[in-house]
């Protein structure tokens, strides 16, 4: 069993890698414990073999993407692509992978746990929109779509999906449909906070008051904070080091967030704000922990929706879209507009767009 469990170079969590009926699965086991990983792997392999025997499918997009990408390392008589074409497709595929990861991360989901069937027309449309936001040329986007088409055709030929969503996009064009955002109520946030143990009891409210991502906020240390000797709004900043893509950003905390920090007891052993007594010193799997708690207390939303709640409320208060974009760490202001302007009145949109310094 040990051969089926491994840790990728860019992760501390264990992953499963197994081939069943000549089909490969690679997926996160969502644990840093080898003993737990091996137990989960045994259970997962048993489940997969049972599904294979029953003719059921349970295929992850990540697995199909990886196999297709690696197949381009060598010539293949089935497609007959030249070395140059295969290299170009791999370049596009890397961008596709990064952009889809961003799309699902903005929804609070892990791309490595997404089923192949979950990459649909909406995801292809948003992929194109994000590439346009980044200022990429139409020619480059079309090259990316060609590689994307071949990727999804490969997955479709394996019968993991019924329809190639890229071909649907090419027929229909840009008709973007973003998922609806469910904003958690204050009562639901209170229930979730009461359920959480230790310093995590302060975590939901802190996300609500900062708009941060779960992973980046779970790993903040007291040393990342500046100005806590005078804990008033305008004087306290937080430097986020463990962000998506490693892009460090510094935010000035609002008084509500500062007041939460003042309530959190400090540890003599752990440097983390949201600390625990484990060897790591913090809650490494905070997202998984809160997913379980959310089901228990009928949270009615996702933890990631606290980030959306922060952004929408700040825009309604009069923050500029530029300030919100920088504060929450969107790669482009157009992404911020696309996600949140649909929840603003025309007047609120005009205020948000009026000046890049509004609210500073």
Image: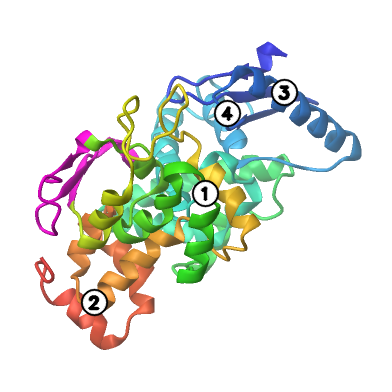
Mark 1 lies on residue: 196
Whichever of labels 1 and 3 marks the residue nearer the N terminus, that label is 3
Marks 3,2: beta carbons within 8 A: no
Which disc is residue 31 wearing? 4
Q: Kindly report the distance in space between the C-alpha atoms of the residues bearing marks 2 and 1.
A: 30 Å
- Determine if the magenta segment contains residue 244: yes
Q: Judge from the rendering whether residue 114 lies leftward or rightward of residue 306; answer left or right.
A: right
**345 relative to 350 in the view: left or right:** right
User: Over which residues does the magenta segment extend?
Assistant: 223-251
What residue is drawn where x is 83% and y is 30%?
49
Q: Report helix, strand or loop for mark 3.
A: helix
Quadrant occupied by the C terminus: bottom left
Assess disc 1: are there few (<14), some (14-19) or many (≥20) residues with their C-alpha within 10 Å of its C-alpha.
some
- CB of mark 3 within 8 Å of CB of mark 4? no
Q: Secondary structure at mark 4?
A: loop
| Category of crowding for the residue at label 3, using alpha-carbon neighbours closer than 10 angstroms: few (below 14), some (14–19), many (at least 20) | few
Closer to the camera: disc 4 or disc 1? 1
Which mark, residue 39? 3
Q: Nearer the viewer, mark 1 or mark 3?
A: 1
Q: Secondary structure at mark 1?
A: loop
């Amino acid at each position: 069993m040990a051969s089926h469990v491994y840790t990728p170079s860019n992760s501390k969590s264990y992953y499963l890698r197994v081939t069943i009926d000549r089909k490969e699965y690679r997926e996160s086991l969502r644990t840093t414990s080898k003993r737990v990983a091996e137990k989960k792997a045994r259970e997962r392999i048993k489940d997969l073999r049972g599904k294979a025997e029953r003719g059921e499918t349970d295929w992850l997009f990540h697995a199909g993407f990886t196999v297709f990408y690696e197949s381009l390392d060598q010539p293949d008589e089935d497609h007959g692509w030249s070395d140059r074409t295969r290299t170009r497709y791999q370049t596009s595929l890397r961008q596709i992978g990064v952009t889809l990861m961003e799309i699902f991360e903005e929804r609070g989901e892990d791309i490595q746990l997404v089923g192949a069937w979950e990459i649909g027309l909406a995801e292809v449309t948003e992929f194109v929109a994000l590439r346009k936001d980044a200022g990429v040329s139409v020619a480059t986007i079309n090259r990316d779509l060609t590689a994307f088409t071949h990727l999804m055709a490969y997955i479709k030929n394996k019968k993991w999906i019924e329809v190639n969503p890229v071909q649907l996009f090419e027929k229909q064009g840009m008709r973007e449909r973003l998922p609806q955002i469910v904003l958690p109520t204050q009562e639901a946030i209170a229930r979730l906070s009461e359920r959480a143990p230790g310093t995590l009891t302060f975590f939901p409210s802190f996300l609500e008051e900062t708009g941060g991502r779960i992973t980046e906020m779970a790993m903040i240390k007291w040393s990342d904070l500046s100005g806590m000797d005078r804990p008033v709004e305008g004087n306290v900043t937080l430097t986020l080091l463990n962000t998506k893509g490693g892009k460090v950003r510094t935010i000035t905390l609002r008084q509500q967030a500062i007041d939460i920090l003042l309530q959190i007891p400090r540890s003599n052993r752990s440097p983390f704000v949201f600390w625990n007594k484990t060897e790591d010193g913090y809650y490494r799997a905070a997202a998984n922990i809160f997913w379980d708690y959310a089901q228990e207390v009928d949270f009615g939303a996702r933890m990631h929706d606290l980030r959306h709640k922060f952004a929408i409320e700040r825009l309604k208060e009069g923050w500029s879209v530029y300030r919100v974009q920088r504060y929450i760490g969107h790669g482009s202001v157009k992404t911020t507009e696309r996600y949140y302007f649909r929840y603003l009145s025309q007047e609120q949109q005009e205020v948000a767009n009026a000046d890049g310094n509004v609210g500073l």
